[in-house]
Amino acid sequence: MKETKSIVLLSSGLDSTVNLFLAHKQSQVVQAITFDYGQLAAANEIKQSSKLSKLLNIPHIVVDLPWLKKIGGSSLTDHTHKIPTGKDVSIADHSVSVQTAKSVWVPNRNGVFLNIAASFAEVLQADQIIPGFNLEEAATFPDNSDDYMKAVTAAFHFSTSNQVKVTSYTIKMQKTEIMKIAIKEKVPLEMLWPCYFNLDHWCGECESCLRTKRAMIQNNLKIEEFFAGV
């Protein structure tokens, strides 16, 4: 039987990294793609994604999207806007999370990423594109949802000759479940970069860090070595 070929969208955060490891285990990953769209953490994301890809002997490429920074609209790319941290973030309060999500929302980011990946998939004859989507963030980011994934797959039925599909191993999982898989699959957590900032250690205060921290604590992991000031 023909081995399934995959392309993985890799940011080096928990979700995309676990998907990389699972895709590597269950298919042939023909390309890992990291995007530089002017986000504050771009340098760290690229560095760690390169390390993770090299660890698994997977081809890795960085795609530059400077225009996503130029058009603005997000605190991740417009550095005159503050990324919510600390008391401005409450991952236990859905209404607060909806507001912080608006701040870090990058206009049509996942739509852009997936369409670029689809071009790679057609050339490389990949069967599937794998983003790090999950149930927890789909509650505030609709472009992380199963419905969105199915809609994009339906569009690719028309726009790609090989009718590539979008799938994600973590689409129905909360972060705690994803962390549990990371531990089981021996993902080197020290090689992740979940933080919105470009620092020496994960800040521990942005929404992405707080969700990762909660998942680690709920899996009885020591967090001191990962987060700044802990």
Image (cartoon, helix red, strand yellow):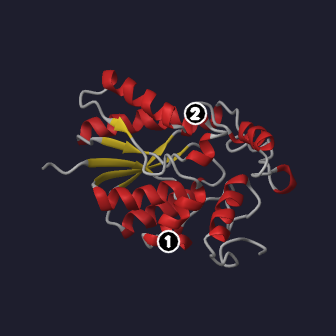
Q: Quadrant of residue 104?
A: top right
Amino acid on which disc 2 is placed: Trp
The reply to whether residue 81 is visible in this rendering is yes
Q: Which residue is mark 2?
A: 67
Compared to residue 17, the image places residue 141 above or below, namely above
Q: What is the distance, in whole Å, between disc 1 and disc 2 at their CAs? A: 37 Å
Amino acid on which disc 1 is placed: Ile
Q: Secondary structure at mark 2?
A: helix
What crowding class fits label 2: few (fewer than 14 Cα within 10 Å), some (14-19), or many (20 or more)? few
Lateral position of residue 229 relative to residue 63, left or right:
right
Q: Residue at x 79, y 47 (%)?
A: 93
Q: Quadrant of residue 129?
A: top left
Q: Residue at x 73, y 64 (%)?
A: 203
Residue 33 x, y percent position in the rendering: 42, 49
Residue 183: image tag: 1
Residue 116 x, y percent position in the rendering: 41, 35
Find the residue positioned furthest to the top.
158
Q: Residue at x 52, y 37 (%)?
A: 110
Find the residue positioned furthest to the left.
1
Lateral position of residue 213 relative to residue 170, left or right:
right
Residue 35 x, y percent position in the rendering: 50, 46
Compared to residue 47, the image places residue 157 above or below, namely above
* The C terminus lies in quadrant: bottom right
Q: Secondary structure at mark 1?
A: helix
